[in-house]
Amino acid sequence: MATHVYVPSDAEYEEVRGQRLLGFLFFLISDCVIFGDFIFSYLYLRNASPVWPPPGIERPYLYLAAVNSIVLFGSGATMHYAMEGMRHARLRQFVWFTVATIVLGSMFLGGQAYEYTHLHDTWSGSTFGASFFTLTGLHGFHVFIGVIFLITVLIQTLRGTYTQQRHFGLTAATLYWHFVDVIWVALFFLFYIY
Amino acid sequence: MDHNATSATNTGSAVTGGHIHPPPDTFIKKYVFSLDHKVIAVQYFITGGLFFILAGLLAELMRAQLSGPNNHVLSVATYNQAYSVHGSAMVWLVIIPLLTGGFGNLVMPLQIGARDVAFPWLNMISFWLFPPAGILLFASFLYGAPEAGWTEYPPITLQMPFGTSMWCLAIFLIGISATITGLNFLVTIVKMRAPGMTYTRMPLFVWATATTAFLSMIATANLSAALAGLFIARTFHVPFYDVAKGGAPVLWQHVFWFYSHPAVYIMILPAFGLVSEIIPTFVRRPIFGYKMIAYSSAAIGLLSFMVWAHHMFTSGLEHWEQFLFMILTMTIAVPTGIKVFSWVATLWGGKIRLDSPLLFVLGFLSTFTFGGFTGILLASVPVDIHEHASYFVVAHLHYVLFGGSVFGIFAGMYYWWPKMTGRLLDERLAKWHFWLMFISFNATFLPMHWIGLLGMPRRVATYDPVYASTNLFVSISAFVLGASMLLFLYNALRSARKGEVAGPNPWGARTLEWMIPSPAPYYNFKDIPIVLSGPYDYGKPLPYANISQELATVPMH
């Protein structure tokens, strides 16, 4: 079959971009609800328990998580500079800052894996472990998906899929990455500070 | 084109109408993995219809068991499985997919003058999550189907065999599917309305679909999370609901009902919407209180998030919580009442044409309003504590979900069948279907109110012999009710073979879907129409520009 790629006009592109952007924002809202459900469960169980954490359960180590948080927030900053590069058609800036974001995201996942293997509490051990591993696991899964997402759009950029004007895929990846950052702020506060 | 039309271009959203792809050329692309919203709607109708038959047969089995006080048609365990799967299937595999997936897909893009939904590919995925979910749910009978009712409260759920995990997965898939559909529809309605179609010129069915889509997007995402939580609690012994490890079974009731109360409105708002379409068409006058009907949909949508704990009055809430949720729940009667009064005011003094869609709407109005009244009774804490888990609740629920949603589904089916298939249904059979269904419905569920008030508990396979004669009457009525569905099935098959050709606008309606041929062509609109005013001004010229004139003339019956 002959392949003919249809190139939409600027007006058509803008219309489709608006639809996709709204759709992606709605997806992030519904994703927020999923985190919200488990956060509600955590607060409910915490409220139902006379002492918190439950007796015999130690809180996870704050400083490791703090370092890990800085790594993740740093990746938010590099992501921002990557997109600045794309907006000003500086391809090298985009590529290297995206690579930095991918590396920092992977480091965060490594830190989380280290934390998981050095905790005494387990998923099925207590209500704290139940909430902790479910929520941070769900978040870690999101970071993992985000890393895959970034690798994909990086390859697509190198193959010339995106231009300075037309790069919705990159916008979506950026939004998703910042969203995952913001969720981590809530989780960090709930599990390590509050 | 006059200057009105040009200025109207700025108020709607869609400008180009999108790029036109060539129509699919293979059977698979055309009918199986179709991207066309009209084909996907038919897929929902057929799949949902099959599940409707299965869920209905389960109900008939239950009524056979209950026709005598100590029957042995079903074992006690099988009876528990039957009502659990019947409830789950009716909610998630029949009413929600038919109203949102079916009518939403079939009608909404046509009514806003769009060529398809915003993300046709997501629409296809959303449909294809639905049959596997249904198969999982019904296949759970092979592995010990769930026995804790459609609400599946722990701790008993944690002790059940693998069938309950299948239930979790099935409803999880439905949750994802409904969330995707909600997102897709909301983007479509916000971004793809024809030029000139402002929010207050949208047909009321679109308003209802938008509210439903919002609820699906928010509440159903929560359902998926809740189901994932129950699944990991069962499979990996994560102690969310395990009292021994500090968990709380009541937590499940909170997260479940935080979805399932909005779900009640996901199941009724589209029916409200299609009632608002059908009434003006068959009384030939503008809908009374357009804006009030539209905004009351939104009000119901918002309020529905604030009433979930009225399902938990006997689960140990604080008194102030009971009082708060009682008041909030009763508040919902206000926007709902606004709708009912507006519909009655539209009917008042109109030239009523009693065709089958309007008959079903009138059936809907009477039975749903009655169910609404018992709803207010159940919302008040003292009554609810007395009536909780009795047949009174079963009666109330079937008056709103069968008398409301299922009557609404049939009203919409008789109304939009010509648009979907291009052929008419037999009107005489339709009227027989209505009267048989209406009478046997009331004969089935009305007596349940009294036996419930007398104290007969729900979800039990046997009962005190004092209720025997009423239950026998209910069972016989339920068999007639089931048989009445065969009339529709026969009518549909007959219409497909030798139904009269409908033409573009058999009812003389004014919304955009009737301005194009029946069935709608692949791209719906040759040119994107331009909307000049609202759709219900009967007696005035049609408010559209840019549509072909020979179709736009409204025939007079």
Image: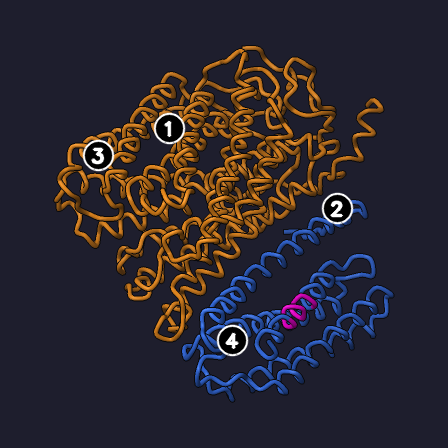
Chain colours: A blue, B orange
Quarter-of-image position of residue B17:
top right
Which amino acid type is shown beneath numbered disc 2?
Glu
- The local crowd at label 4, few if under 14, some if 14 to 19, many if 20 or more residues have their Cα within 10 Å, is many
Q: Are marks 3 and 1 on the same chain?
A: yes
Disc 3 versus disc 4: distance between alpha carbons? 50 Å
Report the mark closest to the observer, 2 or 1.
Answer: 2
- Secondary structure category for the residue under label 1: helix
Position of the C terminus of chain A by quadrant:
bottom right
Residue in front for this viewpoint, A133 or B100: A133
Which amino acid type is shown beneath numbered disc 1?
Leu
Which mark sits nearer the N-terminus, 3 or 1?
3
- Chain containing mark 1: B
Q: To which residue does mark 4 refer?
A: A132
Disc 2 versus disc 1: distance between alpha carbons? 42 Å
Magenta stretch bounds: A178-185
Q: To which residue does mark 3 refer?
A: B475
- Secondary structure category for the residue under label 2: helix
Quarter-of-image position of residue B404:
top left
Disc 4 versus disc 1: distance between alpha carbons? 55 Å
Residue B445 lies, in percent from the top left, at 30, 33
Residue at point 73%, 39% (across, down): B14
Instruction: Determine whether label 4 and label 1 are within 8 Å by CB.
Output: no
The dot on residue A15 is: 2
